[in-house]
Amino acid sequence: MSPKEGSGNALAASSCVPTITEPPDVVSQGVGFLDINKSPYRTAILSRAGAGVVTGYIHRDGREFHPDDPVKIFRFVKMILGR
């Protein structure tokens, strides 16, 4: 057995792969919406929210995104341009 075989390098290399399910910028900025937990677009919504592209709707209980609502053209353009 060579020194590398028993050193655990294979484990160290495989544990370096991040297993984050949320975009890192979203986690650090604390962005969240009450109504997207079951949305298939949750990660994309949070990513764009972390970048400041989408803000959702502010209610007394917190923020909502309304992922099933139709998108108005000016909001769509904003999302595409990323501004």
Image (tube, grey):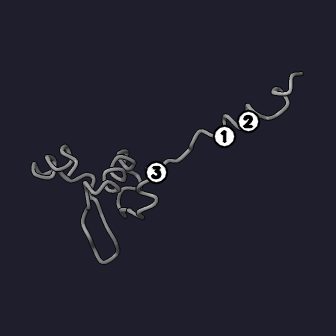
Q: Position of residue 25 (x, y in %)?
A: 41, 54
Which numbered marker is on residue 51? Answer: none
- Say few, some or many: other residues with alpha carbon within 10 Å of mark 2 (under 14 / 14 to 19 / 20 or more): few
Query: In what quadrant of the picture does the N terminus appear?
Result: top right
Q: Position of residue 83 (x, y in %)?
A: 20, 52
Point 13% across, 46% down: residue: 77
Residue 6's place in the image compared with 74, above or below, is above
Residue depicted at x 40% and y 52%:
38
Q: Could you say which is closer to the camera, residue 7 or residue 17?
A: 7
Quickly name the residue at label 1: 15
Q: Position of residue 65 (x, y in %)?
A: 28, 59
Query: Could you tell which of marks 1 and 3 lies nearer the N-terminus?
Result: 1
Q: Which mark is residue 11?
A: 2
Eye-nearest disc, 2 or 3: 2
Q: CA distance from mark 2 to mark 3?
A: 24 Å
10 Å crowding of disc 3: few (<14), some (14-19), many (20+): few
Q: Nearer the viewer, residue 64 or 80?
A: 80
Q: Secondary structure at mark 2?
A: helix
Q: Residue 35 lies in what quarter of the image?
A: bottom left
Mark 1 residue type: Ser
51 up-or-down from 80: above or below: below
Looking at the rendered structure, the kind of residue marked 2 is: Leu
Q: Are marks 2 and 1 in contact (CB under 8 Å)?
A: yes
